[in-house]
Image: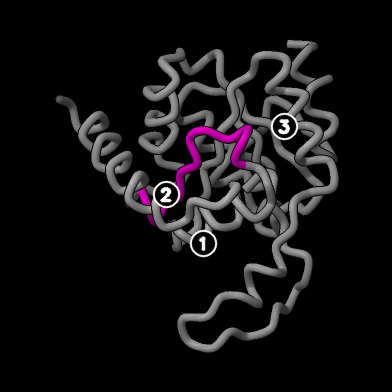
Amino acid sequence: MNQTAKRLANFEAELRRHTECVRTHYDAVLRIESEEPSLPLPGDFTGEEAAWKAYPDARATLKALAQQGHRLSLLSNATDDLFVQRLVNRLDLRPWLSPTFSSAGLGLRKPKREPFDLILSRWNLPPGSVVVVGDTLNADILGAHNSGMRGILITADEAPRNDEFRETIVPDGTIAALGELPGLIETW
C-alpha cells in the first residue's frame, strides 16, 4: 500500500470515529460573519462557531452542481477537524460534500498535493477532470495546480495575502460569488 493510500485509510478510520461524535445533520463555501467573534472560554468555541455562516448562495449552488452530476468536497486548512465537521453539519452542507477533509485531520496542508490526491483517490478521477474553488492563491489555487487540477478563485471574501501572489499564481477562472460557478464550469 503506497503512502497516500495508507494516509487515506488512517484518515477514514479517524473520520469514522469523529463522525460518531458529530452525527448531527451535517474554504470555499464558508465565511466568517464577524471580524471579531466573541472570545471563547478555554475549550468553548461556541462564539467562534456561531460567527461562521455559509455564503448566501452556497446551498443552492452545491445542490445545483450535485444535480448536474458533479462530485463536491471540502478541503480546509483548519487546525481543528471537529470544528470543520461541526460547521459543515450546522450549516447543512453535508448532503453535498464528500469527503470533508481538514489539515488537522489529515496532517497535511494545502498547497501540498497529497490532500488533493486523497480526494482524487477517493473519487477515482484523473486530476484534469477536477476543479478546485477557493479564496487563496497560495493554498487553494497553487494546491490545485500542484495536483494537475484547475483552480477557480472566488473573490467574495478574498484573502488579503492574495496580492502577494497575483503575478505568480494565476487561477484558471475567477468568480465573485459561488452562484457563478455552474455557469463557468459549463463553458469548459
Q: Residue at x 74, y 51 (%)?
A: 54
Q: Is residue 81 above or below residue 145?
A: below
Q: Residue at x 45, y 13 (%)?
A: 126
Q: Secondary structure under badge 3?
A: helix
**What residue is disc 2 on?**
19
**Which residues make up the magenta segment?**
94-105
Three-letter amino acid code of the residue under disc 3: Leu
Q: Quadrant of residue 95?
A: top right
Three-letter amino acid code of the residue under disc 1: Phe
- Position of 156 with respect to 135 (left or right) is right
x, y percent for residue 8:
30, 35
Mark with earlier residue (3, 1): 3
Report, in whole angstroms, how far the alpha carbon at label 2 lies from the one at label 1: 12 Å
**What residue is disc 3 on?**
62
- Looking at the figure, which quarter contains the N terminus? top left
- Looking at the figure, which quarter contains the C terminus? top right
Do tag 3 and tag 1 residues touch (Cβ < 8 Å)?
no
Which numbered disc, 3 or 2, marks the residue closer to the eye?
2
Q: Is-magenta flag for residue 101?
A: yes
- Position of 146 with respect to 114 (left or right) is right
